[in-house]
Amino acid sequence: TRCADVTGVQTCALPIWFGRMKNRLKKSEIFGAIFVMVFGTLMHFFYDWSGKNPIVALFAPYNESTWEHLKLLFFPVLIYSVFQYAYIGKQYSGYVTGRLAGIVSGALTIVIVFYTYMAVFKHPILWIDVTLFYLSVIVCYRVAYSITRQEKIPRAAEILSGICLIGIMLSFFYLSVL
C-alpha cells in the first residue's frame, strides 16, 4: 500500500491531493497555450477587421512593428490568466509571479530571435514569424508553469509582479495612442 495509517490518520491524502493539483495546473497551462496561439493569431487581424478602430489598436497590433506584435502574446495570456486564476490560480502562491515571468520570457524570445534572424536574412519571413510566435507561447507557458508550481513565492513578489503586469499593460495602451 502507498498510504500509511498513523494514529488513525491516512498520511497519503495530502501528497495525492498536491499531485492532482499540479496535474490540473499542467492541463490548464497546455490549454492556455493553445488558447493563446489561436487567439493571438486571430488578434493579428482585429485592427483591420474593426475598420481600424483606435480602441482595438490599444489591444491588437495596428502596424507591423515588433512592439505591436508583442500584444499578440501579452493580451491573450492576460485574458486567459484572469479565468485561470479564478479556476485554479488562487491555490498557488506564485501564480502572478509565474505569469509575469512567462510573459517576459516569451516577449524576450520574440525580440531576440526576431532581430537575430533579421540580421542574418535581412528581411522578414512569414513562416519564421509565425513559428516564432508559437515558440514564444510555449516558452511563456513553460516558464509560467515552472514558477507557479513552486510552493514558497513571497506575497511581496506576487504584489510586485501584479504591479509590473499592470505597468506593461499601461505601456501598451500609452504607446499605442502616440
Image (cartoon, rainbow, N blue to C red):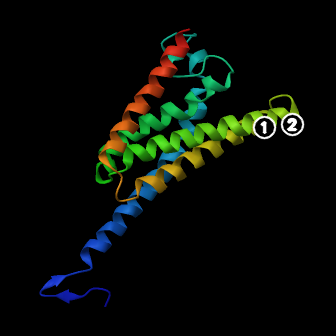
**Quarter location, residue 40:** top right
State left or right for residue 162 relative to residue 130: left
Seen as rendered, the residue at the extreme right is 121
Q: Amino acid at mark 1?
A: Thr
Seen as rendered, the residue at the extreme left is 8
Label 2 sits on residue: 120
Would residue 127 be seen by someone viewing this image from the given angle?
Answer: no
Residue 120, horizontal then vertical, whole percent: 86, 36
Q: Which residue is pictured at 87% across the width and 34% down the height?
A: 121
Residue 110, horizontal then vertical, whole percent: 66, 37
State left or right for residue 120 relative to residue 136: right
State left or right for residue 80 relative to residue 17: right
Residue 91, horizontal then vertical, whole percent: 29, 53
Rendered position, 73 above or below 169: below
Residue 78, horizontal then vertical, whole percent: 44, 35
Task: Locate the C terminus and report the quarter of the image it occupies.
Answer: top right
Tell me, yes or no, whether the two marked residues, 2 and 1, touch with CB atoms within 8 Å.
Answer: yes
Q: Which residue is pictured at 37% across the width and 35% down the height?
A: 162
Rendered position, 102 above or below 122: below
Q: Which residue is pictured at 43% across the width and 39% down the height?
A: 80
Would residue 141 be seen by someone viewing this image from the given angle?
Answer: yes
Label 1 sits on residue: 116
State left or right for residue 111 relative to residue 115: left
Figure label count: 2
Disc 1: CA contacts within 10 A as few (<14), some (14-19) or many (>=20):
few
Q: Secondary structure at mark 1?
A: helix
Q: Secondary structure at mark 2?
A: helix
Q: Which residue is pictured at 31% across the width and 91% down the height?
A: 1
